[in-house]
Amino acid sequence: MLTTLARAKSLLGLAEEDISQDALLLISLKAASRAIEDRCRRSFCLLEHIEHCTGLPGPFLSVRQYPIRSVSSIMSDHGGALDPFEIVEETPGLLYRACGWPRGERSIVITYRAGYVLPEQGTEEEPSDLPETLEWACVLLAQHLQRTPGVQSERVGDISVTYSSTPNITDMPAAVEALIAPHIRIL
């Protein structure tokens, strides 16, 4: 999850000792975390990934998950290591190799660790480094899911609410969209 139950309760101003809504909030936070990752087309949890790519012209190669923390290996389909290379710090998800990458039908297999230490995984030695915008977006979306599931439109004057016959979690509030926009992976 992109936040913890305790952090979400704190951000929402809920008393820590009040556990009456914990189960619903926890489910909403899990759903919101998943929806945000789906919308951003990437996982935020720090994990090891094995990715198969086809080389492109030029010295840069893009991977699906970022930020890249480390690369264990980059191998060609022939089993040879593709060294040397660098992680491009300024542009998340890019690897640089001065002599370029093998092109064409050949496959490149990259084994790497990427993502953030999530709030529930953080320790004193390795604290969470998930951007606060993602955590806040998760809390706002969970709150939205609890308050207005399936609401398609609202009107304040003479109060009118229209419910969608098929609620869609991908219809996110504008504030959530704005918070996650910088984290969306471009295809």
Image (spheres, rainbow, N blue to C red):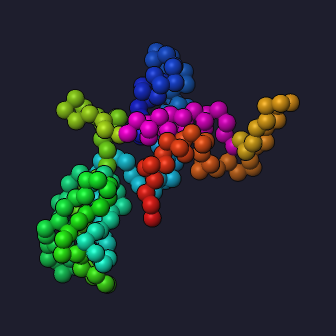
Quarter of the image holding residue 7?
A: top left
Image spot of residue 112 (x, y percent): 24, 58
Q: Nearer the viewer, residue 46 or 19?
A: 46
Q: Quadrant of the C terminus?
A: bottom left
Image height of 108 relative to 137, above or below: below
**145 versus 115 height, above or below:** above
Q: Position of residue 48 (x, y in %)?
A: 26, 55
Residue 62 at x, y percent in the picture: 32, 65
At x 22%, y 58%, the residue is 87
- Name the residue located 51 percent from the left edge and 53 percent from the top edge: 39
Label tally? 0
* Predominant secondary structure, magenta span: helix
Q: Is residue 141 magenta?
A: yes
> Eyeballing the image, is 147 above or below 82?
above
Question: Is residue 162 visible in this depiction of the protein?
Answer: yes
Left or right: residue 92 compared with residue 8: left
Assess whether residue 33 is covered by the magenta stretch: no
Asked if residue 108 can be seen in this view, the reply is: no
Residue 116 sits in quarter = top left
Start and end of the magenta stretch?
131-150
Please state, as top left, top right, bottom left or bottom right, where the N terminus lies in the image: top left
- Residue at (43%, 49%) from the top-left corner? 183
